[in-house]
Amino acid sequence: MLYFVLRRIGYGFLVVLGVIIVLFLLFYVLPGDPVSAMMGGKGDELTRRNLERELSLDKPLPVQFIYYVNDLSPIGLHELTPENQKKYTYFGLIPLGSYSLVLKVPYLGRSYQNNRRVGEIIWQDIEGTIVLAITAMFFATVIGMGIGIIAALRANTWIDYTLVSISVLGISIPSFVLAILVSVFFGFYLADYTGLKLTGSLWDLNPFTGEKELRLKNLVLPAFTLALRPLSIIVQLTRSSMLEVLSQDYIRTARAKGVHFRKIVLKHALKNALNPVITAVSGWLASLMAGAFFIEYVFGWQGLGRTTIEAVGQRDMPVVMGTTIVIACVFVVINIIVDILYALIDPRVRLE
Protein backbone atom coordinates (compact mmCIF):
# COMPACT_ATOMS: atom_id res chain seq x y z
CA MET A 1 0.00 0.00 0.00
CA LEU A 2 2.81 2.41 0.90
CA TYR A 3 4.59 1.69 -2.40
CA PHE A 4 1.32 2.32 -4.28
CA VAL A 5 0.84 5.71 -2.57
CA LEU A 6 4.47 6.74 -3.09
CA ARG A 7 4.26 5.84 -6.77
CA ARG A 8 1.13 7.93 -7.24
CA ILE A 9 2.76 10.85 -5.43
CA GLY A 10 5.82 10.50 -7.66
CA TYR A 11 3.67 10.55 -10.80
CA GLY A 12 1.85 13.60 -9.46
CA PHE A 13 5.13 15.38 -8.78
CA LEU A 14 6.26 14.74 -12.37
CA VAL A 15 2.98 16.13 -13.71
CA VAL A 16 3.30 19.32 -11.65
CA LEU A 17 6.96 19.67 -12.66
CA GLY A 18 5.95 19.33 -16.30
CA VAL A 19 3.33 22.06 -15.89
CA ILE A 20 5.91 24.34 -14.27
CA ILE A 21 8.43 23.77 -17.10
CA VAL A 22 5.84 24.46 -19.81
CA LEU A 23 4.60 27.61 -18.08
CA PHE A 24 8.13 28.88 -17.50
CA LEU A 25 9.12 28.37 -21.13
CA LEU A 26 5.85 29.90 -22.31
CA PHE A 27 6.61 32.95 -20.22
CA TYR A 28 9.71 33.60 -22.35
CA VAL A 29 8.20 32.61 -25.71
CA LEU A 30 5.30 35.05 -25.49
CA PRO A 31 6.04 38.58 -26.72
CA GLY A 32 6.26 41.37 -24.18
CA ASP A 33 8.66 42.67 -21.56
CA PRO A 34 7.71 41.97 -17.90
CA VAL A 35 9.79 44.92 -16.68
CA SER A 36 7.98 47.29 -19.06
CA ALA A 37 4.66 45.85 -17.87
CA MET A 38 5.56 46.59 -14.26
CA MET A 39 6.87 50.07 -15.06
CA GLY A 40 3.90 50.91 -17.24
CA GLY A 41 6.14 52.42 -19.87
CA LYS A 42 7.61 54.84 -17.33
CA GLY A 43 10.80 54.96 -15.28
CA ASP A 44 14.48 55.39 -16.00
CA GLU A 45 17.18 52.88 -16.92
CA LEU A 46 18.34 52.52 -13.30
CA THR A 47 14.84 51.49 -12.21
CA ARG A 48 14.70 49.00 -15.06
CA ARG A 49 18.01 47.39 -14.07
CA ASN A 50 16.92 47.18 -10.42
CA LEU A 51 13.70 45.41 -11.42
CA GLU A 52 15.57 43.02 -13.71
CA ARG A 53 17.91 42.16 -10.85
CA GLU A 54 14.98 41.70 -8.44
CA LEU A 55 13.21 39.37 -10.89
CA SER A 56 16.51 37.61 -11.77
CA LEU A 57 15.95 38.53 -15.43
CA ASP A 58 19.62 39.49 -15.72
CA LYS A 59 20.59 35.82 -15.22
CA PRO A 60 20.83 33.05 -17.89
CA LEU A 61 17.60 31.16 -18.55
CA PRO A 62 18.60 27.90 -16.74
CA VAL A 63 19.59 29.92 -13.65
CA GLN A 64 16.27 31.77 -13.76
CA PHE A 65 14.44 28.42 -13.86
CA ILE A 66 16.38 27.14 -10.84
CA TYR A 67 15.53 30.32 -8.94
CA TYR A 68 11.87 29.99 -9.88
CA VAL A 69 11.65 26.35 -8.73
CA ASN A 70 13.52 27.30 -5.54
CA ASP A 71 10.87 29.97 -4.88
CA LEU A 72 8.03 27.49 -5.51
CA SER A 73 9.48 24.70 -3.39
CA PRO A 74 8.35 24.59 0.27
CA ILE A 75 11.97 23.73 1.10
CA GLY A 76 14.45 26.16 -0.40
CA LEU A 77 18.00 27.40 -0.17
CA HIS A 78 18.26 31.17 0.37
CA GLU A 79 20.56 33.84 1.60
CA LEU A 80 19.28 35.46 4.77
CA THR A 81 19.33 39.00 3.45
CA PRO A 82 16.86 41.67 4.61
CA GLU A 83 15.26 41.56 1.14
CA ASN A 84 14.70 37.78 1.33
CA GLN A 85 13.31 38.00 4.85
CA LYS A 86 10.69 40.43 3.56
CA LYS A 87 10.08 38.38 0.43
CA TYR A 88 9.57 34.94 2.01
CA THR A 89 7.70 33.60 5.02
CA TYR A 90 10.08 31.27 6.87
CA PHE A 91 9.10 28.46 9.23
CA GLY A 92 12.51 27.01 9.97
CA LEU A 93 16.19 27.66 9.36
CA ILE A 94 19.17 25.31 8.95
CA PRO A 95 22.40 27.31 8.47
CA LEU A 96 24.56 26.12 5.56
CA GLY A 97 27.44 28.58 5.36
CA SER A 98 26.31 31.87 3.87
CA TYR A 99 23.00 30.23 2.89
CA SER A 100 20.25 28.56 4.88
CA LEU A 101 17.91 25.68 4.11
CA VAL A 102 14.48 27.04 4.96
CA LEU A 103 10.96 25.71 5.31
CA LYS A 104 8.74 28.35 3.78
CA VAL A 105 5.45 29.19 2.13
CA PRO A 106 5.89 28.75 -1.66
CA TYR A 107 6.51 32.11 -3.25
CA LEU A 108 4.64 32.69 -6.52
CA GLY A 109 5.92 36.18 -7.23
CA ARG A 110 4.08 39.49 -7.46
CA SER A 111 1.49 40.74 -9.90
CA TYR A 112 2.79 43.04 -12.61
CA GLN A 113 -0.39 45.10 -12.45
CA ASN A 114 -0.80 45.88 -8.75
CA ASN A 115 2.41 44.47 -7.18
CA ARG A 116 0.36 42.27 -4.85
CA ARG A 117 1.65 38.84 -3.90
CA VAL A 118 0.21 36.21 -6.23
CA GLY A 119 -0.37 33.95 -3.24
CA GLU A 120 -2.62 36.57 -1.66
CA ILE A 121 -4.61 36.94 -4.89
CA ILE A 122 -5.08 33.17 -5.14
CA TRP A 123 -6.06 32.85 -1.48
CA GLN A 124 -8.66 35.58 -1.97
CA ASP A 125 -10.20 34.04 -5.11
CA ILE A 126 -9.92 30.30 -4.52
CA GLU A 127 -12.94 30.26 -2.19
CA GLY A 128 -15.27 31.23 -5.04
CA THR A 129 -13.94 28.51 -7.34
CA ILE A 130 -14.11 25.79 -4.68
CA VAL A 131 -17.68 26.72 -3.66
CA LEU A 132 -18.76 26.80 -7.31
CA ALA A 133 -17.15 23.44 -8.12
CA ILE A 134 -18.51 21.64 -5.03
CA THR A 135 -22.03 23.03 -5.54
CA ALA A 136 -22.00 22.03 -9.21
CA MET A 137 -20.70 18.55 -8.35
CA PHE A 138 -23.36 18.06 -5.66
CA PHE A 139 -26.11 19.14 -8.05
CA ALA A 140 -24.76 16.95 -10.87
CA THR A 141 -24.41 13.90 -8.61
CA VAL A 142 -27.83 14.02 -6.95
CA ILE A 143 -29.84 14.93 -10.04
CA GLY A 144 -27.73 12.82 -12.41
CA MET A 145 -28.04 9.65 -10.33
CA GLY A 146 -31.78 10.17 -9.90
CA ILE A 147 -32.37 10.63 -13.63
CA GLY A 148 -30.06 7.71 -14.46
CA ILE A 149 -31.99 5.38 -12.13
CA ILE A 150 -35.32 6.45 -13.67
CA ALA A 151 -33.95 5.89 -17.17
CA ALA A 152 -32.73 2.40 -16.22
CA LEU A 153 -36.01 1.41 -14.60
CA ARG A 154 -37.90 2.66 -17.69
CA ALA A 155 -35.43 1.21 -20.17
CA ASN A 156 -36.45 1.20 -23.85
CA THR A 157 -39.46 3.41 -23.23
CA TRP A 158 -40.09 6.97 -24.41
CA ILE A 159 -39.00 8.22 -20.98
CA ASP A 160 -35.64 6.47 -21.33
CA TYR A 161 -35.11 7.71 -24.89
CA THR A 162 -35.99 11.29 -23.93
CA LEU A 163 -33.69 11.38 -20.90
CA VAL A 164 -30.79 9.82 -22.80
CA SER A 165 -31.25 12.25 -25.70
CA ILE A 166 -31.22 15.24 -23.35
CA SER A 167 -28.09 13.92 -21.65
CA VAL A 168 -26.34 13.56 -25.03
CA LEU A 169 -27.28 17.16 -25.82
CA GLY A 170 -25.85 18.26 -22.45
CA ILE A 171 -22.54 16.58 -23.24
CA SER A 172 -22.38 18.06 -26.74
CA ILE A 173 -22.93 21.77 -25.97
CA PRO A 174 -19.65 23.60 -25.15
CA SER A 175 -19.69 25.05 -21.64
CA PHE A 176 -18.94 28.63 -22.73
CA VAL A 177 -21.82 28.56 -25.25
CA LEU A 178 -24.16 27.17 -22.61
CA ALA A 179 -23.00 29.81 -20.12
CA ILE A 180 -23.92 32.61 -22.52
CA LEU A 181 -27.33 31.09 -23.28
CA VAL A 182 -28.18 30.47 -19.62
CA SER A 183 -27.01 33.90 -18.46
CA VAL A 184 -28.95 35.76 -21.16
CA PHE A 185 -32.11 33.65 -20.94
CA PHE A 186 -32.48 33.25 -17.17
CA GLY A 187 -30.49 36.28 -16.01
CA PHE A 188 -31.87 38.81 -18.48
CA TYR A 189 -35.07 37.87 -20.31
CA LEU A 190 -36.59 35.96 -17.37
CA ALA A 191 -34.90 37.98 -14.61
CA ASP A 192 -38.23 39.35 -13.37
CA TYR A 193 -39.46 35.79 -12.78
CA THR A 194 -36.24 34.10 -11.62
CA GLY A 195 -34.92 36.98 -9.52
CA LEU A 196 -31.43 36.15 -10.80
CA LYS A 197 -28.84 38.49 -12.30
CA LEU A 198 -26.60 38.18 -15.34
CA THR A 199 -23.48 38.48 -13.23
CA GLY A 200 -22.57 38.31 -9.56
CA SER A 201 -20.19 36.74 -7.06
CA LEU A 202 -20.49 34.82 -3.82
CA TRP A 203 -19.82 38.04 -1.91
CA ASP A 204 -21.22 41.39 -3.10
CA LEU A 205 -20.76 44.82 -1.62
CA ASN A 206 -23.82 46.38 -0.02
CA PRO A 207 -24.29 49.74 -1.82
CA PHE A 208 -25.48 51.40 1.39
CA THR A 209 -23.16 50.01 4.07
CA GLY A 210 -20.16 49.15 1.87
CA GLU A 211 -19.83 45.79 3.64
CA LYS A 212 -19.54 42.38 1.98
CA GLU A 213 -22.73 40.30 2.00
CA LEU A 214 -23.24 36.64 1.10
CA ARG A 215 -25.27 36.26 -2.13
CA LEU A 216 -26.08 32.57 -2.57
CA LYS A 217 -28.58 33.24 -5.35
CA ASN A 218 -25.69 34.38 -7.55
CA LEU A 219 -24.45 30.79 -7.33
CA VAL A 220 -27.50 29.27 -9.05
CA LEU A 221 -26.82 30.00 -12.72
CA PRO A 222 -23.05 29.36 -12.84
CA ALA A 223 -23.39 26.19 -10.74
CA PHE A 224 -26.19 24.88 -12.99
CA THR A 225 -24.16 25.64 -16.11
CA LEU A 226 -21.00 24.03 -14.74
CA ALA A 227 -22.93 20.98 -13.55
CA LEU A 228 -24.72 20.19 -16.81
CA ARG A 229 -21.88 18.31 -18.51
CA PRO A 230 -20.95 16.01 -15.56
CA LEU A 231 -24.68 15.60 -14.84
CA SER A 232 -25.23 14.28 -18.36
CA ILE A 233 -22.31 11.86 -18.06
CA ILE A 234 -23.48 10.66 -14.64
CA VAL A 235 -26.96 10.01 -16.09
CA GLN A 236 -25.56 7.69 -18.75
CA LEU A 237 -23.07 6.05 -16.38
CA THR A 238 -25.75 5.40 -13.75
CA ARG A 239 -28.17 4.06 -16.36
CA SER A 240 -25.59 1.65 -17.83
CA SER A 241 -24.46 0.46 -14.40
CA MET A 242 -28.04 -0.08 -13.19
CA LEU A 243 -28.98 -2.03 -16.32
CA GLU A 244 -25.93 -4.24 -15.89
CA VAL A 245 -26.74 -4.99 -12.25
CA LEU A 246 -30.45 -5.54 -12.90
CA SER A 247 -29.53 -8.24 -15.43
CA GLN A 248 -27.50 -10.25 -12.89
CA ASP A 249 -28.64 -13.70 -11.74
CA TYR A 250 -29.07 -12.73 -8.08
CA ILE A 251 -31.51 -9.98 -9.08
CA ARG A 252 -33.59 -12.44 -11.10
CA THR A 253 -33.48 -14.89 -8.21
CA ALA A 254 -34.72 -12.22 -5.78
CA ARG A 255 -37.59 -11.34 -8.11
CA ALA A 256 -38.46 -15.04 -8.52
CA LYS A 257 -38.68 -15.36 -4.73
CA GLY A 258 -41.26 -12.61 -4.68
CA VAL A 259 -39.13 -9.86 -3.13
CA HIS A 260 -40.71 -6.46 -3.69
CA PHE A 261 -39.16 -4.73 -6.70
CA ARG A 262 -38.57 -1.49 -4.77
CA LYS A 263 -36.60 -3.39 -2.14
CA ILE A 264 -34.56 -5.11 -4.85
CA VAL A 265 -33.68 -1.78 -6.42
CA LEU A 266 -32.86 0.09 -3.22
CA LYS A 267 -31.17 -2.66 -1.21
CA HIS A 268 -29.38 -4.75 -3.83
CA ALA A 269 -29.14 -3.13 -7.25
CA LEU A 270 -28.51 0.48 -6.26
CA LYS A 271 -25.70 -0.32 -3.84
CA ASN A 272 -23.72 -2.32 -6.39
CA ALA A 273 -24.50 -0.04 -9.33
CA LEU A 274 -23.34 3.18 -7.71
CA ASN A 275 -19.79 2.10 -6.81
CA PRO A 276 -18.31 2.97 -10.24
CA VAL A 277 -20.46 6.10 -10.37
CA ILE A 278 -19.17 7.39 -7.03
CA THR A 279 -15.60 6.72 -8.12
CA ALA A 280 -16.13 8.67 -11.34
CA VAL A 281 -17.77 11.53 -9.43
CA SER A 282 -14.73 11.84 -7.16
CA GLY A 283 -12.49 12.44 -10.15
CA TRP A 284 -14.79 15.09 -11.61
CA LEU A 285 -14.26 17.66 -8.84
CA ALA A 286 -10.77 18.63 -9.97
CA SER A 287 -11.95 18.79 -13.59
CA LEU A 288 -14.76 21.14 -12.60
CA MET A 289 -12.31 23.52 -10.90
CA ALA A 290 -10.30 23.67 -14.12
CA GLY A 291 -13.43 23.86 -16.29
CA ALA A 292 -14.90 26.80 -14.37
CA PHE A 293 -12.60 29.35 -16.05
CA PHE A 294 -14.88 30.57 -18.85
CA ILE A 295 -18.04 30.11 -16.81
CA GLU A 296 -16.66 32.37 -14.07
CA TYR A 297 -15.74 34.96 -16.69
CA VAL A 298 -19.17 34.90 -18.39
CA PHE A 299 -21.08 35.18 -15.11
CA GLY A 300 -18.67 37.65 -13.53
CA TRP A 301 -18.04 35.15 -10.73
CA GLN A 302 -15.03 36.08 -8.61
CA GLY A 303 -12.75 33.05 -8.68
CA LEU A 304 -9.47 31.71 -10.01
CA GLY A 305 -10.87 31.27 -13.51
CA ARG A 306 -11.95 34.87 -13.95
CA THR A 307 -8.72 36.13 -12.38
CA THR A 308 -6.63 33.99 -14.74
CA ILE A 309 -8.44 35.10 -17.89
CA GLU A 310 -8.15 38.75 -16.88
CA ALA A 311 -4.44 38.24 -16.13
CA VAL A 312 -3.92 36.70 -19.58
CA GLY A 313 -5.46 39.78 -21.18
CA GLN A 314 -3.17 42.01 -19.11
CA ARG A 315 -0.09 39.80 -19.72
CA ASP A 316 0.24 39.44 -15.97
CA MET A 317 2.25 36.23 -16.22
CA PRO A 318 3.04 35.69 -12.50
CA VAL A 319 -0.72 35.54 -11.80
CA VAL A 320 -1.34 33.26 -14.79
CA MET A 321 1.48 30.93 -13.77
CA GLY A 322 0.48 30.94 -10.10
CA THR A 323 -3.20 30.13 -10.65
CA THR A 324 -2.39 27.44 -13.22
CA ILE A 325 0.12 25.75 -10.92
CA VAL A 326 -2.36 25.80 -8.02
CA ILE A 327 -5.09 24.25 -10.19
CA ALA A 328 -2.62 21.61 -11.40
CA CYS A 329 -1.66 20.77 -7.80
CA VAL A 330 -5.33 20.47 -6.78
CA PHE A 331 -6.00 18.26 -9.80
CA VAL A 332 -3.07 15.98 -8.95
CA VAL A 333 -3.91 15.71 -5.23
CA ILE A 334 -7.57 14.87 -5.87
CA ASN A 335 -6.65 12.25 -8.47
CA ILE A 336 -4.16 10.65 -6.07
CA ILE A 337 -6.86 10.46 -3.40
CA VAL A 338 -9.34 8.98 -5.93
CA ASP A 339 -6.80 6.34 -7.03
CA ILE A 340 -6.21 5.31 -3.42
CA LEU A 341 -9.94 5.18 -2.62
CA TYR A 342 -10.65 3.22 -5.79
CA ALA A 343 -7.95 0.71 -4.89
CA LEU A 344 -9.42 0.31 -1.40
CA ILE A 345 -13.03 0.02 -2.58
CA ASP A 346 -12.47 -2.28 -5.55
CA PRO A 347 -10.48 -5.42 -4.65
CA ARG A 348 -9.87 -6.08 -8.37
CA VAL A 349 -7.44 -3.14 -8.43
CA ARG A 350 -3.94 -4.27 -7.44
CA LEU A 351 -1.95 -2.00 -5.15
CA GLU A 352 1.21 -1.87 -7.24
Image (tube, rainbow, N blue to C red):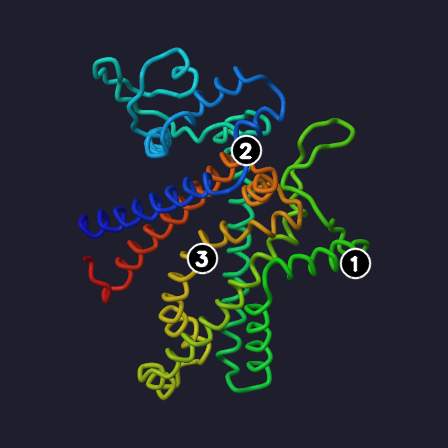
Tell me the crowding category of disc 1: few under 14, some 14 to 19, or many 20 or more residues within 10 angstroms, Cα based. some
Identified at 41% across, 65% down, the residue is 277
Tell me the crowding category of disc 2: few under 14, some 14 to 19, or many 20 or more residues within 10 angstroms, Cα based. few
Q: Identify the residue position indicated by label 2 in the image.
A: 124
The three-letter code of the residue at mark 3 reads Trp
Tell me the crowding category of disc 3: few under 14, some 14 to 19, or many 20 or more residues within 10 angstroms, Cα based. some
In space, the residues marked 1 and 3 are separated at their CA atoms by: 31 Å
In x, y percent, where is residue 112? 55, 29
Q: Identify the residue position indicated by label 3 in the image.
A: 284
Label tally: 3
Q: Is residue 249 above or below residue 3?
A: below
Residue located farthest toward the top when viewing the structure as drawn: 82
Identified at 44% across, 80% down, the residue is 261
In x, y percent, where is residue 6? 22, 47
Q: Is residue 220 left or right of residue 72?
A: right
* Badge 2 or badge 3: first in the primary sequence: 2
Q: Are marks 1 and 3 in contact (CB under 8 Å)?
A: no
Between marks 2 and 1 in the image, the one whose residue lies nearer the viewer: 2
The three-letter code of the residue at mark 2 reads Gln
Badge 3 element: helix
**Residue closest to the eye, 196 or 256:** 196
**Residue closest to the eye, 264 or 245:** 245
* Badge 2 or badge 1: first in the primary sequence: 2
Badge 1 element: loop
Badge 2 element: helix
Give the quadrant of residue 174: bottom right
In space, the residues marked 2 and 1 are separated at their CA atoms by: 32 Å
